[in-house]
Amino acid sequence: MDNVAKTIRTQGMHNVANTIRTQSKDNVANTVRTQGMDNVANTIRTQGTDNVENTIRTQGMDNVANTIRTQDMDNVANTIRTQDKNNVANTIMIQYKDSRHG
């Protein structure tokens, strides 16, 4: 939708798998916060277009695997913060439309 701000907060416990998919258009700001505990697998996929700023914050504890995939186009700023404890594997993949961000 046009100029919509979406905030998603999920808290998973006890072998829960959380999957969040957001697709934004037209100056939409998406904020996704996930907190996983007790062998929880969090997967976040965001696709932003047209001056969209995506912010992803994940905090994983106790053998949690976090996977973050972002695909950006047209002046998109991505901020990814991850904090891990106890055998956590983090995978971050970023694909840019051009070479502006290195």
Image (cartoon, grey):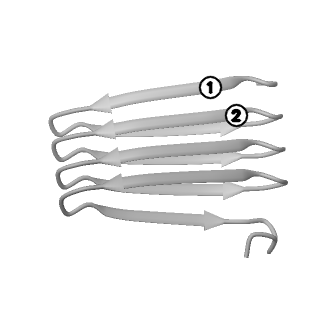
Q: Given the image, on which type of amino acid does mark 1 rest?
A: Lys
Q: Say which element carries label 1.
A: strand
Q: Quadrant of residue 63?
A: bottom left
Q: Where is mark 2, residue-wise?
A: 29
| Label 2: few (<14), some (14–19) or many (≥20) C-alpha neighbours in 10 Å | some
**Identity, as a three-letter code, of the amino acid under mark 2:** Ala
Q: Is residue 35 left or right of residue 57?
A: left
**Distance of mark 1 from mark 2, alpha carbons?**
7 Å
Name the residue located 26 percent from the left edge and 60 percent from the top edge: 88
Residue 96, percent from left and from top: 72, 66
Specify the label residue 6 is tagged with. 1
Which residue is pictured at 41% across the width and 40% down the height? Answer: 19
As drawn, the label of residue 54 is none
* Residue 100 vertical position relative to residue 16 in the rendered view, above or below: below
- Against 13, residue 39 (above or below) is below
Quadrant in which residue 84 is drawn? bottom left
The front one of 54 and 41 is 54
Residue drawn at x 66%, y 47% is 47
38 left or right, relative to 28: left
The answer to whether the residues at label 1 and label 2 have Cβ atoms under 8 Å apart is yes
For this rendering, which residue is in front, 15 or 58? 58
